[in-house]
Amino acid sequence: MSRVVVCGSLNMDVVVQSKRRPVTGETLLGAAVSFLPGGKGLNQAVAAARLGIPTAMIGTVGNDAFANSLRGFLADCDVDSSGVREIDGPATGVAIIQVAGKDNAITVASGANLHFRAQMVRQEPRADEVWVAQFETPIAETRAILTRARAAGARTVLNLAPFAPFPDNLLKRVDVAVLNEIELSQATRTPLRTASALSQVVAACQKLRAQGARAVVATLGGRGAVVVTADGATAIPAFKAKVLDTTGAGDCFVGALAARLTQGATPVEAARYASAAAACSVERLGAGPSMPTAREVAARLARA
């Protein structure tokens, strides 16, 4: 059976909930704190696995208690973590997430994630797999891994998040590029805002297709998503949701999209399914723990 292989970051998320964010120099009392598994790579792997797709996680953690917690969480979610390497010295990645109202702000201490190397990947890609990567591990290593995956005939998904400058030829190794409107603006040097016209978003996506990406998916929060392929642009409406915490929604989208691609879906079909999955995820606290099951996504799609 086809599977999803995620190469990327693993973090422990320290989630602090408060009514508002403190201003510079201010201390707020009365906030609630939670320690939850996260990191874009882990979130995306868990999202795919909870949807019933065989999934493997490849990445690096430190030699500490957080690493043990993250491995245990992956095991509980039926994610193959045999490709997660423990290294001495750097700590496991940590993300400090401030949740105020329905919004969040995130600061990441990457730690062991920055020591991930392509040669640590012992599994050879297969043509029936979907390989997923992001920008929370070194980009040069991501490029090398995607090159191997494409050469083996696997489909590749790259989440250009958080945005960082990347080599001109990187997108030639990418079947589906996924990014939000902020990252799209940064990647294409196009001034985009949350209220930018859809035509402007599509034009920016076309710039990434011109660089080699076969399909580009722009996630637009409450406005849904846009998928741009050789056949044109398709708008994907957002699904209704009672928003509690948006942390990890983008990762849920990527993992669900990759899961659907393993089942032969087109980028447009996969993006619609991923949009429904993301709507489920924002109704729960945290990133990794908020990922929905296939039954929950099916129910959301049925109500649309």
Image (cartoon, grey):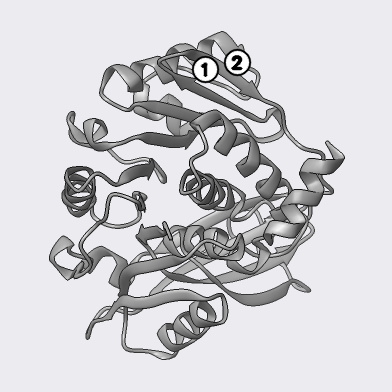
Left or right placement of residue 235 versus residue 8 in this view: right
Residue visible at 35% across and 28% down in the picture: 187
Hey, what amino acid is under mark 1? Val
Quarter residue 158 falls in: top left
Residue 262: percent from the left, percent from the top? 46, 49
Vertical placement of residue 188 versus 133, above or below: above
Which residue is under mark 1?
201
Question: Can see residue 20?
Answer: no
Which residue is under mark 2?
196
Vertical placement of residue 197 versus 304, above or below: above
Q: Nearer the viewer, mark 2 or mark 1?
A: 1
Residue 299: percent from the left, percent from the top? 81, 50
Give the structural element (helix, strand or loop) at label 1.
Answer: helix
- The tally of labels here is 2
Question: Can see residue 173?
Answer: yes
Q: Earlier in the sequence, mark 2 or mark 1?
A: 2
Vertical placement of residue 148 versus 60, above or below: above
Discs 2, 1 touching: Cβ within 8 Å:
yes
Left or right placement of residue 40 versus residue 88 in this view: right
Residue visible at 60% across and 14% down in the picture: 198
| Label 2 crowd bin: few (<14), some (14–19), many (20+), radius 10 Å | few
Q: Tell me how far mark 2 sits from mark 1, CA to CA.
A: 7 Å
| Label 1 crowd bin: few (<14), some (14–19), many (20+), radius 10 Å | many
Which residue is nearer to you in this view: 243 or 124?
124
Residue 35: percent from the left, percent from the top? 60, 78
Q: Residue furthest left?
A: 119
Residue 92: percent from the left, percent from the top? 37, 77
